[in-house]
Image (tube, helix red, strand yellow):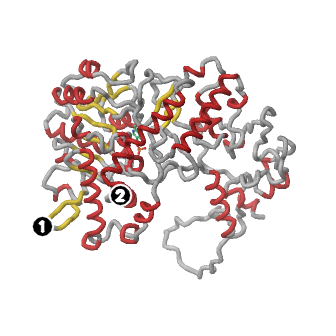
Amino acid sequence: MLNRQGRPTAPQAHGVADPAAGMGDEAARLQGDASRATPGAGSHPTFTGNKALAQIEPLLFEIGRYDVTGVDLDEPEDFKPRLGGLERKDEIGLPGLSEPEAMRHYVRLSQMNYGIDTGLFPLGSCTMKHNARLNERMARLPGFSDVHPLQPVSTVKGALELMNELGRYLVTLTNMTTVALSPKAGAHGELCGMMAIKAAIEARGEGKTRNVVLVPDSAHGTNPATAALIGFVVRPVPAREDGWVHVEDVKKLLGPDVAAIMLTNPNTCGLFENQVAEIAKAIHDAGAYFYCDGANFNAIVGKAKPGDLGVDAMHINLHKTFSTPHGGGGPGSGPVVLSARLAPFAPVPFVTMKDGELTLVENAADADESPFGRMTAFHGQMGMYVRALSYMLSHGSDGMKQASEDAVLNANYIRASLSDLFSQPFGDKPCMHEVLFDDTWLKDTGVTTLDFAKAMIDEGYHPMTMYFPLVVHGAMLIEPTESESKTSLDLFIATLRDLAMSAKKGDTARFTGAPYHAPRRRLDETRAARNPILKWTPPAPIAEAAE
Ligand SMILES: *Cc1c(COP(=O)(O)O)cnc(C)c1O
C-alpha cells in the first residue's frame, strides 16, 4: 500500500508521534497489519497505535477473515446453475466480518474524514457551503427519494412539477431561454453546452469550417478537455498581468474558424471579467457562441444575469451554488441554461407542458425542436434538484442575493485581513467570492504552498485550493462562502497569520514535515497519481490465510 511506504518518523522539534508509530507487533498483528509495527518511536507510544479518539483503521480486507462470514445464511439447496459454465470456481475472497466490526470500520473511516460538517472548507472554486438540513429533509421525502426513472409518467407528476419549477428558477436567475437539467456535473454540463453549440453550427452548415474554441489560460482544466473531447481545436487566450481577459486579445484570435469561447465568470482568479459584455459582442459579431463556465455563479446570483451579459450557454453546478453535500465524490448536478439561439438544440429528455399537463419528452423525434441527442440514460439527479429548489425557496430572491453578497464580503474580509502578510498576484484589488494569493511572500522562507497547506491540516483546516489557477505561481485560492460566521473567519484568519509568521521567522520544521497530527502523514502524491495501486493484493494466498 502506498500509504505505508516510507512512513516518516516524527521530528522531535514538535514531539509529535506518528499515529501508528507506537504500535507494537502484537497490536499490529491483531489489527491485521504487521507492516505498521514500528515500536518505540515517538514520545508517548500507545500499545494499539491509536491516539485516543483518533483510531487507526486498516483496510476491510486486512481485518476480515476469509474462513467466516458475518451473516448467518442457510446453505443453499442443490440447484442447477444456469450460467452455462461461467460460474465462479474459486472462493469469492470477500472478508468476513461481524456487523459491529463492519460498522466500526466505516464509522472510524468517516471520523477521519474532513467535511463541511466538521469545519471550514476554504477550497476555492468549489463553493463548499453549509447544506441546510431542511434541504436534506426535503430530498428524503418518499415522493422524491423513492421514484423510479421507469415509473409511468402519470405517477410522477409531482417530481415533474418540481423539475419544471427548478428549471423556471434557473432560467429566471440567469435570464436565459431554457435549461437542460440532465447533466450530472459541471464538466458534464460543459459537454452538453458545447454539444448544443456544435449542433447549432452544424445546422448552419458550418460544421466543417468552424472548429476552434478559445479558452483562456486560467480556465479550469475541464474547459479545454471538453472542447477537445468533441473534436474542437483549443486556441488559448493568453493571461494578462491584471488577471482579466482583454477584448483586444480575443479579437486577435477571432476568425471564421472560431466556434465559441469558453470563459469563466467570475474567473478563476476570483475577478469579475470587466470586459465581458464587449467580449460577448465581439464573439457574436464573428458568428461564434459564448459558453460561460458558471461554476462561480455563487458570487453573482441575484446581482448579475449571464443572459444580460451575452452568454449563450452556461452550466450551473447545483452542488456548488445551490448547496448539496459534495466533495469526496458525492453526487453532483450540472444543468445548462441556453440562450434563444441554442434552445432548439437542448437535449432530451425534458419536461414540457402539453394539453395543460406536464409531461416528459423522451425521444428527439417527439420534440418540435431539434435536440442534439441525450446526455444520460434518465432525467438527472432528482435528489440534487430537490435540494436546490429547497435552497432557493427557503432563501427567497432577497436571500439568494444576500448569500452572494455575503460570500463576496467574507472573501474580501479574509483578503483584507491577510494582505499585509500574503501577496496577491494581480494587485491589491477587491475580489469576488474567492481570494487568490501567490507564493511571492514565501520566497526565501524554505516553505512552499504545499508545505503551508499541509500545516493547515495540523491546525484542523482543510487546505485551500493550491496551484490553481495554473497561471499564478504557487497559487492559494481561498473561498470561505457565505455560510461562515465572522467568529469562524476570525479564527481561520488568526491561524493563517500564525502560520505565516512561523514561516517568515524560519520555523520550517512546522511545515516541511507536516501534517504531524493527521491519521496519514505526507504521502507521495506524485507517485500515487502516476502509479496508483487500485487493487488490493492479499499478503498470502487466501487459501493459506484461511487455514
Ligand atoms: C468545479 C468546476 C468545474 C467542474 O465542475 P464539476 O461539477 O466538478 O464537474 C468547472 N469549472 C470550474 C471553474 C469549477 O470550479
**Residue furthest to the front:** 487
| Residue type for callout 2 | Tyr
Asked if residue 363 is positioned above or below residue 191 in the image, the reply reads below
Tell me what residue is drawn at x 61 percent, y 26 percent.
448
Q: Is residue 103 left or right of residue 149?
A: right
Residue placed under numbered mark 2 in the picture: 385
Instruction: From the top left corner, tell me how far across and down residue 4 is, in percent.
Output: 71, 43
Asked if residue 502 is positioned above or below residue 356 in the image, the reply reads above
**Residue furthest to the right:** 40
Task: Specify the quarter for ligand 1.
Answer: top left
Residue placed under numbered mark 1 in the picture: 355
Q: Is residue 175 left or right of residue 540?
A: left
Q: Is residue 451 visible?
A: no
Residue count near mark 2 (Cα–Cα under 10 Å), binned few <14, some 14–19, many ≥20: many
Viewer-proximal residue among 435 and 10: 435
- Classify the position of the C terminus by image quarter: bottom right
Q: Is residue 402 left or right of residue 168?
A: right
Instruction: From the top left corner, tell me how far across and down residue 283 is, in percent.
Output: 21, 28
Asked if residue 437 is positioned above or below residue 382 in the image, the reply reads above
Residue 290 placement: quadrant: top left
Tell me what residue is drawn at x 58 percent, y 81 percent.
78
Instruction: From the top left corner, tell me how far across and down residue 142 is, in percent.
Output: 40, 71
Tell me what residue is drawn at x 45 percent, y 29 percent.
469
Viewer-proximal residue among 265 and 540: 265
Q: CA distance from mark 2 to mark 1?
A: 25 Å
Residue 460 placement: quadrant: top right
| Residue type for callout 1 | Asp
